[in-house]
Amino acid sequence: MKKLVHFSYGLCGFLVLTHVLGLVGVYDLHGHYSWETWPGFYALYGFGAYMALVVLAEVLRAAVQKSPDYYDAFDPEPVDPEPDDHGHHDHGHADGGH
Amino acid sequence: MLASVSPGLLICLAALLIPLLQGKLRSAWSVLVPLLSLIDLCLRDQGVDGVIDLGAVTLTTVRLDQTAFFFALLFHVALIIGTIYAWHVDDPVQQVAALIYGGGAIGAALAGDMITLFVYWEVIAVASVFLVWARRTERAYAAGQRYLIWQIVSGVLLLAGALMIYQDTGSLAFDRIGLEGPAGWLILIAFGIKAGFPLLHTWLVDAYPEATPSGTVFLSAFTTKLAVYALIRGFAGEELLIWVGSVMAIFPIFYAVIEDDLRRVLSYSMINQVGFMVVGVGLGAGFGVSGAMAHAFADVIFKGLLFMTMGAVLHQTGKVAASELGGLYKTMPYTTVCCLVGAISISAFPLFSAFATKSLVVDGVAEAHLTGVWFILVFASAGVLHHAGIKIPFFAFFAHDQGLRTTEAPWGMRIAMGTSAVLCVAVGIYPWALYELLPPDLLLVHGEGLAVTDYQPYTLSHVVFQLQILCFAILAFVVLMVTHKHPPETPGTNLDVDWLWRGPLKRGLRAAFDGPLAKLAKGFEHAALTGVPAAISHVFMAPGPDGGRLARNWAMGSSVFAFLALLAGWLLLSA
């Protein structure tokens, strides 16, 4: 796990380096928009988008997440707990096979 | 003679033989039929075939051009892989339903007129619901009913729009429809339901995760991609679709983050990916339509692969919730590798399929100078990495070991997953083979035309940009995990817009109208049971008031419409 963490740090550093190599003219770095070639634009957008997604999703979770059986309360009659109906919990029954 | 019959119809007919077969012969037949049909499809000449003259209307059951061929080919591939995956299934209901569902999708992709399209549209609606019901749980039954209502409504709208167009133009040809009149809007909503447009999407995330492990694999391939095909035919270049697609690309990723059921995560992810395609359709010819088609192909394979791996996990462990899984890489290493390939493909890493297909759409947006949409799509790309690239493989196979000890999935499942994984990499490494299959079109790059087969996704800039956004998003995940700030997976029901008809309002309505509503439901049931034979005799017997052809067709149209409305009403009230 530690190795993977260090690998991801290294990879990100390497990518920044390749970006800089493009900027100084080792290869042709170009994009449709001017900001695409700014050093760190994609890095920050990727990092920021991920963080924003996680934070905003927590807001959504607080707003919309209810208990797993939330909708069962609105069923006209209680779900009949026949043992057969829980076949998907058992190995091999999930396909409804005979 | 056989040569002029639609391959879709042939597959549907072949499916009816399945109940006559026994044991593994059924599985073998299920794989053999689409294989033979694929050969048949490739040997057919392009053009129009299977024309049925009904007097006033002429049905074109086979219209084989490059676009139709592309989707028919894709559906064949999906059907073959799916039936191999389902080799172990010993359930004629699912086996018949899967073949008819796939055959119906192929028939619809080859339909040259709106009536043929409508018929197959309804065939796939009815066939596919059995893949949900075949799970044989109360939840699956209820979700299937809600699913069927949406699908039937979509069919009714399509038929109504088609008949309005026929009245105006005298033509039923399935070509460009546009949004000039109300008929166009009706048909757009019909297509939009099947494509999972925002607010019309709940059937997808409701029913797909409730289907059987192999059923969801079929479901993920056909309905939404057929809708993308229909949108390309009818509404390519409609600017509205760019905005609809953008919303589709962005809102599901938030739901995918908080969802615990990994197959429901993939269902939200599917809306997100179809969003990219819908943006492409909205951009119109060139980058847009080429991108939508190429990405549809890639998506069927990698999303199918991800659904297959989650189906394998569900089949082996009986669980598919992120909060209950973890550590499965020890006992399911093969499935783990396949899942990782699917996850890397959908995240659009270079050398994997989505990199070469999604970039057509994103480049098209940039060429059209739609800066806002561009930022949304790039944000959505980081979101895809979160839920499909990291969450699915990490929480199922790694994370903390939950002590689940199982074995690898049956060999049919493994072959199907392996085949899809190889295809994901093949498309990523050599996408030009896929571009060759697209209708020849010119991409406008800085105002100059570029053949789609000359498109070059692998520029050093593009690779560096894409790797930066993905790797720094992974870095964000690593930082959150190392600092223990990553939110845990929690089981729960996440309310979507279907709360409006599944939640308190439903109870309120039921309480208020319990008596009359129950009576009405009974009335509908009675009308449907006695009305169907009447409607059928009406269709075949009754001439129009003036005996004219148009009137006769109107009589047929209105009785079909009435019947379907009746059916929808009955289902709604008895749900």
Image: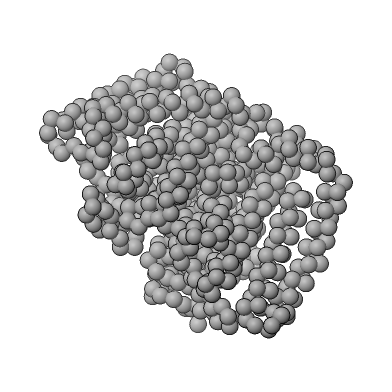
**Residue at point 61%, 33% (across, down):** B494
Is B432 left, or right, of B106 in this rendering? left
Residue sitting nearer the eye, B95 or B114: B114
Q: Residue B551's image quarter?
A: bottom right
Q: In which quarter of the image is the N terminus of chain A?
A: top left
Horizontal and vertical percent position of residue A20: 18, 28
Is B273 left, or right, of B562 in this rendering? left
Q: Does residue B86 lie above or below B501 as drawn? A: below
Is B384 left, or right, of B527 in this rendering? left
**Residue at point 42%, 51% (across, down):** B239
Q: Does residue B69 lie above or below A56 as drawn? A: below
Q: How is the image coloured?
A: one colour
Judged from this view, the residue extending furthest toward the left is: A25
Horizontal and vertical percent position of residue A34: 23, 35
Residue sitting nearer the eye, B443 or B338: B443
Visible in this render: residue B121? no
**Residue at point 54%, 30% (across, down):** B258
Q: Does residue B483 lie above or below B367 as drawn? A: above
Horizontal and vertical percent position of residue B169: 52, 72
**Residue at point 70%, 56% (across, down):** B568
Residue sitting nearer the eye, B549 or B20: B549
Visible in this render: residue A63? yes
